[in-house]
Each structure stands twice: as C-alpha cells, then as structure tokens.
Amino acid sequence: MEAFVSTVNSIIWSPALVFLCLGAGLFYSILTRFAQVRHFKEMVRLLFNSSESSKGISSFQALAVTLSGRVGVGNIAGVAAAIGFGGPGAVFWMWVVAFLGASTAYAESTLGQIYKEDDNGQYRGGPAYYFEKALGQKWLGILFAVSAIIACGIFLPGIQANAVGNAVTVVFGEGNMVTTDFGEVGTNKLIALAIILIVLGFIIFGGIKRIAHFTQIVVPFMAIAYIIMALVIVFLNISQVPGIFALIISDAFTAQAGFGAAIGWGVKRGIYSNEAGQGTGPHASSAAEVEHPSQQGLVQAFSVYVDTLFVCTATALMILITQQYNIVDEVSGSLILQNIAADTEIASPAFTQMALNSVFGNFGQGFVGVAIFFFAFTTILAYYYIAETNVAYLARYFKSQSSLFWVKIVIMFMVAYGTVNNSGYIWNLGDIGVGLMAWINILGILAIFFVAKPAIMCLHDYEAQKKAGGVITFDPQKLGIQKAEFWEKRLAKQRADEAAKASKPAE
C-alpha cells in the first residue's frame, strides 16, 4: 500500500504541477499588475475589518480561519523536509511560491466571495461553487467537492495529528507501551489524542462561528510567539544572517541535492504550507462579511505572506543558523550533507526541535511541542470546515440530512488514525490530497479567466471606487458578471432600504 501511495504521489506531483503552480502565480501577478505589492498597505488596513453578522464572520476572523489551515505542521516539519531533501535552496523557491502565490490567493478568494451563497443563514462558498456558476460546469464543482472531502476530511487531518503525536513523544517520552492493532503506542501519545478529540468535538459541533472565535485568538498568539523565538536566535547569531541568506539564494540554483530537488521540494512544501492555488482559502473567505469581494481577496493574499515569508522563514533561519539539519538524496537515500545524527527523521519536526533545543535547552524543545499542538489543532479545524462546506455543497444534490454529522465523525476518526500511524506514509497521503485539489483548482481558475475574467474586473472596480471615494458597493450586473445571486439580492435590498428611507416623511 505504501509503495502504491508513493507511486500515485510521484505522478500527481510531476514537474507539470510544479510549473503549473508557478505559472498560474506569474499569470495572475501580471494580470493584477502585481496587486500583492501595489496594495500591500490596503491589505494591512483591511485586516482590521471587524464587521461580523449573524450569517458571516469578519475579515480578520476569516483570515484567522484561513491561517489556521496555512500555519500548521507545514511550517515546522514541512520546511525541515524541504531543506532535508532539497537543500537550503528550497527555501528560496518557497519564497517564490509565496510571492507569486499571493496573486493566485487573491484570485481564488475573490471568486469565492463573488459566487458565495446564503445557505440556511450561513455564508458558504469555494471552488465547487464558482466552478458551477462561473463555468456552468456542475460536474467540475462535484469533482472538486469530492476531492476536497477526501483530502481535507480524510488525508490531511492525519498529518497534523501525526505531528502532534510525535511532538508529544519527543517532549514527554513514549510512556508505557500499549499493544494495539496499529502496533505498540505510548500512553503519552494516547493521552494527547484523547485531549485533541474532546476539544475538537466541542468546537466543530459549534460550527464556523465557534471555529472563528477560537482561531482568532490562538493563531495570532502562537504565530507571534513562534516568530519571536526565531528572532531571538537570529539576534544571537546576527553575524551569520547575511551568509545564511547568501547560502539560500546561491543554493537555489546550484543545490547540493540537485537543482530539480530544490525547486520540487521548495514548491511542493511551499504550496502545502501556504495553500495558494490549492482551493482551501476560498472556503473561509466566502464566509466573511465584506462590502466588496476584492477586499477579502486582498486579505487572503496577505495571509500567504504571513505563512511563508514570516513563519516558514522563521523556521528555516532557526534550522540553518544552528546547522541542525542533514541533506539526503531522496532517490538513493544517501547523505549529501551530515550535521546531525544520520538516523534523524527528516519529514518530522525534529530539525526544528533540535534547533531550538540547541539555544534554549529543554524549554525550546517543549515550546516546539506546544507550537505544533496548537498549529496542528487549528489546522484540523480549518480542514474540517473545508470538508463540511463541500459536503453541504453535495448535499444540495443528494438530499442527505445526516451528512454534516458524519463528516464530523469521519474527521475525528482520521485524527485518531493519523496520530498512531507512520509519519512518512501519512505525509505521502497528504501530498496526494494537496496535489489533486491544486490540479483541479488552478486549471479551473485559469479557465474562469478566459471565460469571464470576474476576479480581474472586480479588482478594477474596487480600485476605481477607492479612487473616487465614497461608499464601496458591488454591482455584479454592472460589470457583466453573471450568477452572482447573493450580491444581486444584497444590492437590491440596499436600494430598497434607501428608497424606503428617502420616501419616509421627516419627523
């Protein structure tokens, strides 16, 4: 089974997908005239939009939910894997993916807002919705929804849970060993699993509001604390920093593990970490209460910067400055560079934990364990919401009343399975899920551009309204955007309310 999964993974993550991701990012960067740079100040301003309603969450809450998915184990174990298999140069390609991917994140999240729906008092949207409405291809919407449910409801939660279990083991030890159908499992890992399942169940049965309120507190706190720890290491070794950046850039083109390995692992882990183009971000974005779709698109573009340029770079600097890493030829398994024990597991938080441990001692090791716990847990919440949204999309056609209950049960089972299963195997399953969603979503949003250009027209409209001043509104029919029923109804109600107010006699 593991050999089969590895084969499928290598097919999905062929060079074609790597270049598709980079190409789509460059394509939308040019079309938006590098909005990720031009509107950086506006992105930051929009972060603090606290408009929340009974049906939707605020822009910041949507950002927090999205970041809870993006800031996860990929920032700690994923960066370590990229360096371990692709060399320091892989970090450079993660930066490239983040910069270009910010424009892809803008496009997909803006589309999510344009074509979102009011589903029984809750905003829902995502690739399945905009494929059906913008392209008129219901089958493509169903295909993405099924892929997202399999990826986010089955494959991906196990990676996060597995990393939590491994981190607990490193910090507290295995404990007493218990024989199970999955082999021998330590009691400390089982205790951690029990805590995760109890808290996870409480939150996901409370819906998007409870998820948003939890993540808006936990995610910023943990991200800031993690970056501060990295900055301490950077400050204590400030003289090494120019050399580290020079190593990253030079190794990107003459990588010790091979030029292709640096690009492949940098792009793969970059996409896995920041999720730009994968189609996950639009789900939380669609739930936000905003005046114009482009506003949430810009906020989501900024989230890519937070994930990769801040948190992933923090991890990379800690590992490279302290030299707590090895480089392995993925094909032969032979060591290209050895700084630490040869049997140190690469696809795990080990490099990061050893880096912090070398500076802060046991406190650093414990801190990484706590960071992984919260990063991974909030990522599981984000995956649940994505799976739930796509189950709700399919439920409209299959008339299932219990489907939302069962997706909760399935994701809790997969968390339990992932915690006690083999890490390398789980990472390969996660890569398949990410790759499938990325293939479908990127090809889909490129097709949407050639059919109607809604995301680009939205940006031009928003820029024009900002320049003119006054109240920001969104009229899809004026722009020639079809099937944006939510915004059409919203604008009609606003006009009706204004007319009623104008006709009301003054007191």
Image: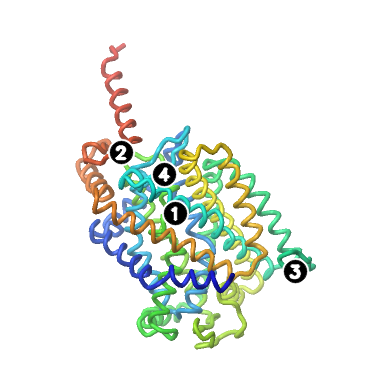
Whole-Å distance between the Cαs marked 1 and 2?
A: 22 Å
Mark 1 and mark 3 residues within 8 Å of each other at the beta carbon:
no
Q: Which residue is mark 3?
A: 184
Whole-Å distance between the Cαs marked 4 and 2?
A: 13 Å
Residue 132: name its quadrant: top left
Q: Which residue is mark 4?
A: 125
Q: Which residue is mark 2?
A: 483
Q: Nearer the viewer, residue 467 or 168?
A: 168
Query: Disc 3 residue type?
Result: Glu
**Label 1 vs 3, first from the N-terminus:** 3
Mark 1 and mark 2 residues within 8 Å of each other at the beta carbon:
no
- Residue 47 falls left or right of residue 234: left
Within-10-Å neighbours for mark 4: few <14, some 14–19, many 20+: many
**Label 3 vs 2, first from the N-terminus:** 3
Residue 277: name its quadrant: bottom left
Query: Disc 1 residue type?
Result: Thr
- Is residue 48 visible in the rendered image? The answer is no
**Label 1 vs 2, first from the N-terminus:** 1
Whole-Å distance between the Cαs marked 1 and 3?
A: 35 Å
Q: Which residue is mark 1?
A: 280
Mark 3 and mark 4 residues within 8 Å of each other at the beta carbon:
no
